[in-house]
Amino acid sequence: MVATPIAQFTGEQVADLITRPAFFVKIDNHQLARPQWGINQADVVFEELVEGNITRFAAIFHSRNVADIGPVRSARTGDFDLLRNLNTPLFGNSGGNPTVMRLLNEVDMVLVGDTNVGRAAYRRNSDRKAPHNLLTSTGDIYAAADGRGGTPPQMFSYRDPNEALPLSAQPLDAVEIDYGGYQVTYQWDEVFQGWARSQQGTEHVDYDGVQVAPENVIIQFVNYGQSVAYAGSPEVKVLGRGEAWVLTAGQIIEATWNRPTEADLTEFRDADGATIELTPGRTWVALPRSGTASYADVDQQ
């Protein structure tokens, strides 16, 4: 029996394998940039620290066509290792430090930023002031890429509908993350069947007013170094091994993450060494420093 193909970044069943490249784009999370456009349609969203102890998103769009995405912002050197295991993705950004842009040319990707394709794929929204108003779309980006880029690998493993979680999984109410400048909460929501995200005590909604509530959240504890491009810019370190918490189906699984080389996909394994399988759907990957998150399980409420 031939297995039904699934979308590489959501695990959802599709009629045919999606062969177009992943579109990886930097999205603003400054207070003047919220609510964001298209954030709920991203298959995967990484949240990483930038200057001033605030965060910026790196979103992967692949399985859905999205008309408005943004606000698009600049690249950081920490983005490089997030790109390198996606088999020549498309990379969207709004410029960057000259050193960042020079080093970015050494990464296996197709650069479709605003300084490369310009008005062919990007536009300003008149309701907001620059730099928090630059938008793009999947249609414009794939047209600008003109067939370049590679088919991405499957990023995570997924459970079948009736498959049980591992015995180490525990019911969870909420997780809190302190990035320094931003405090973020993910709380299980039975209605959404996802993890409702709040920031600074306010519900995180998209431009259409829809709550951000991905089916899965991975809290991957990492280290940050100093960027070679700018001393004040933190550079996320996603190679190596460390602790992770995997939130799925209203439960938490304490895990270990492992990514030996830049070409490898990150593995998430439970206490017994088994690969953790996610709920099909969207996944947000938080990248905080170790010791900056806490949770209370249902029994502790």
Image (cartoon, rainbow, N blue to C red):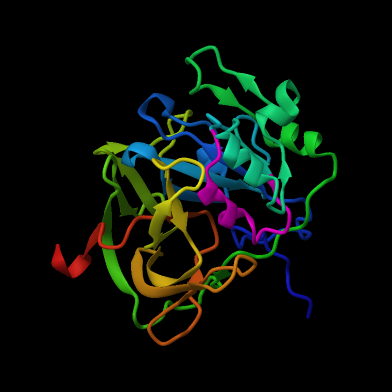
Q: In this orientation, which residue lies closer to the viewer: 262 or 120?
A: 262
Does residue 284 show up? yes
Residue drawn 43% across the image and 27% down it: 33
Q: In this orientation, which residue lies closer to the viewer: 154 or 49?
A: 49
**Would residue 141 be found to the left or right of residue 297 on screen?**
right
Residue drawn 34% across the image and 67% down it: 251
Relative height, residue 271 to residue 204 (above, below)? below
Q: Write down the quadrant of residue 164 in the picture.
A: bottom left
Query: Which stretch is magenta?
Result: 74-90
Q: In this orientation, which residue lies closer to the viewer: 50 or 157?
A: 50
Q: In this orientation, which residue lies closer to the viewer: 223 or 184?
A: 223
Image location of residue 284, percent across then percent down: 46, 53
Image location of residue 198, percent across then percent down: 31, 42
Residue farthest along the right direction in this orientation = 147
Relative height, residue 209 to residue 102 (above, below)? above
Quadrant containing the C terminus is: bottom left
On whether residue 53 falls in the magenta region, the answer is no
Residue farthest along the left direction in this orientation = 301
**Would residue 260 be found to the left or right of residue 146 on screen?**
left
On whether residue 80 falls in the magenta region, the answer is yes
Image location of residue 199, percent across then percent down: 30, 40
Residue drawn 33% across the image and 57% down it: 289
Residue farthest along the top direction in this orientation = 126
**Would residue 273 be found to the left or right of residue 8 on screen?**
left
